[in-house]
Amino acid sequence: MTIQHTLASILLAGAVLAACSPDGDKRASRTPPAAPASAQKPAPDYAALAQAAVADPARPEKDRADDAARKPAAVLAFAGIAPGMTVLEMEAGSGYYTELLSRMVGPKGQVIMQNPAAFDKFLGERVAARLANGRLGNVRLSRSPFDHLDAPDASVDVVTWFLGPHELFYVPRDSGPLGDPKASFADIFRVLKPGGTLVVLDHAAAAGAPSSTGGKTHRIDPAIVKQLAQEAGFVLAAQSDVLANPEDDHSLMVFDPKVRRKTDRFLLKFVKPIPA
């Protein structure tokens, strides 16, 4: 018998034994296990979700008037908001973005609309009007300071802080500081889930400008925000110039008619690392 015949006989015997085995047919037809459903799930179309929220005809007309200057569809697409998320909206003001975030997270999500209690006098009845009659049913109002946020540890998917971090260096006459800068970023880190994101938007000050600029012109050097975030444990993930304005020389107060709603604004995204 040749070597070729011997090998053929061995292979044939193996096939017969496999066929006779109680689970031989199972082994023969076995395929690699399917990937987990989570691995197969495509990423949300953040841009489409943001555009749909902005285009919703039920939005207040007064909000729509600000869209051209604020570019909310681009900002929210960058932020990466999706249905079912819990979003902590720091310094929500009267709720321009609250309205949009509420639509984007949907009925299974939640928005925590945060303003320090010291803002009550400035905001008047605008927040109450925004939330009247439960019209934004997935929104919860919080009046916490920036460094003691009203959320459990690792409970939030995204923290947004739009046009706000400079306020850490502004001290209202009748209330005192709104939050310690380092403690505020540490508390944001605390409430975010591992892998969660912090999205910051603010009026840019000149490079190298001191933090005290925040209390004078309501601007802040982006480098200060980056440093505070990184010291708290965050990693810078992305930057956007969608609201940049190179014609702004960073010298004027943001409420000056020459630059109001036309300031040079920076947009940053930080990630809370997932432990190894």
Image: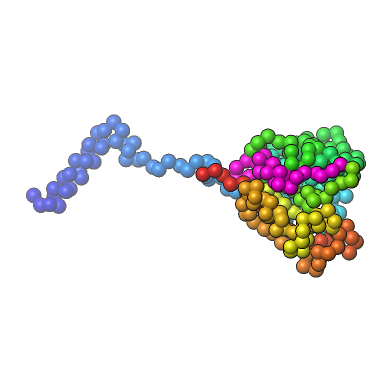
- Residue at 70%, 58% (x, y): give it: 223
Q: Is residue 32 left or right of residue 219?
A: left
Q: Is residue 97 left or right of residue 234?
A: right
| Figure check: 60 above or below 238 | above
| Figure check: 208 above or below 269 | below
Q: Is residue 234 magenta?
A: no
Where residue 238 sits, quadrant-wise, is bottom right
Q: Position of residue 98 (x, y in %)?
A: 78, 44
Q: Which residues are magenta?
A: 175-196
- Residue at 19%, 40% (x, y): give it: 13
Task: State the residue lying farthest toward the top.
Answer: 22
Q: Is residue 177 magenta?
A: yes
Task: State the residue lying farthest toward the left.
Answer: 1
The front one of 42 and 209 is 209
Task: State the residue lying farthest toward the bottom.
Answer: 247
Q: Is residue 83 left or right of residue 6?
A: right
- Residue at 20%, 45% (x, y): give it: 11
For residue 172, say whether it is visible. yes
Q: Position of residue 236 (x, y in %)?
A: 63, 54
| Figure check: 91 above or below 75 | above
- Residue at 78%, 52% (x, y): give it: 166
Q: Position of residue 20 (x, y in %)?
A: 24, 33
The front one of 172 and 100 is 172
